[in-house]
Image: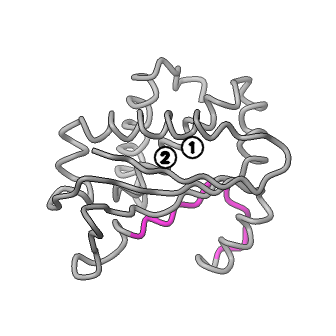
Amino acid sequence: MNINIECTNEFDGWNVDFDWIKNTAKTIFNYLLSQNEISQNCCLKKYDYSGISFDFLFCDSGQTHSINLEYRSKNYPADIITFAVFADSTENERFILDGNINLGEIIIALDKMIEGANEKGISKEDELAFFISHGIMHLLGFDHMTLHDYNFVVEWQKKALESMNINYDKI
């Protein structure tokens, strides 16, 4: 399967390594889809496709605050916002174009991510991998409106990161 990931960096405080982002996201995505509990319950289950695409936007918390307010009516800056356009659409609204499914966009406030990494005493890359895994879970249709759902998302984030030798317990 072809996975196409586009990245845009609008944050001046850290030069994002797009190749690292894409490789990390593909590794996490492939790991999650290889797990029956994910593949049998995600938004892709009923569909035939040959490719997946999604985007990353890296910005600052001022921008996520504006996006949160405009699109979610929430008046605070978010560390991550995911627009899961495929998962959040009704089955009638979902479409596959030339065998490709566009899952949506993950927006990450890098200033908040860097702040979190510094507070936890971990690398920026490990913290960013945590954010990436969280966004991908949302793109696949998993949310955390209840404690049970939150624990499910976090459990699978932990497993995905551990499959990459990232110690989740520090995150």
Residue 1 vs 71, above or below: the answer is above
Query: Between marks 1 and 2, how big is the CA–CA gap?
Result: 5 Å
Q: Amino acid at mark 1?
A: Phe
In this rendering, would 110 be left or right of 171?
Answer: right
First to last magenta residue range: 74-85
The verdict on residue 82 being magenta is yes
Q: Quadrant of the C terminus?
A: top right
Q: Which residue is mark 2?
A: 134
On the image, the x and y values in percent for residue 90 come to: 28, 78
Q: Which residue is mark 1?
A: 131
Residue at figure coordinates x 35%, y 68% from the top left: 86
Nearer the observer, 20 or 120: 20
Residue at figure coordinates x 54%, y 54% from the top left: 6
The verdict on residue 75 being magenta is yes
Nearer the observer, 118 or 145: 118
Q: Quadrant of the N terminus?
A: top left
On the image, the x and y values in percent for residue 53 come to: 41, 56
In the picture, residue 30 is in which quadrant? top left
In this rendering, would 6 be left or right of 91?
Answer: right
In the picture, residue 118 is in which quadrant? top right
Residue at figure coordinates x 43%, y 37% from the top left: 157
Q: Amino acid at mark 2?
A: His
Nearer the observer, 120 or 102: 102
On the image, the x and y values in percent for residue 152 come to: 35, 44
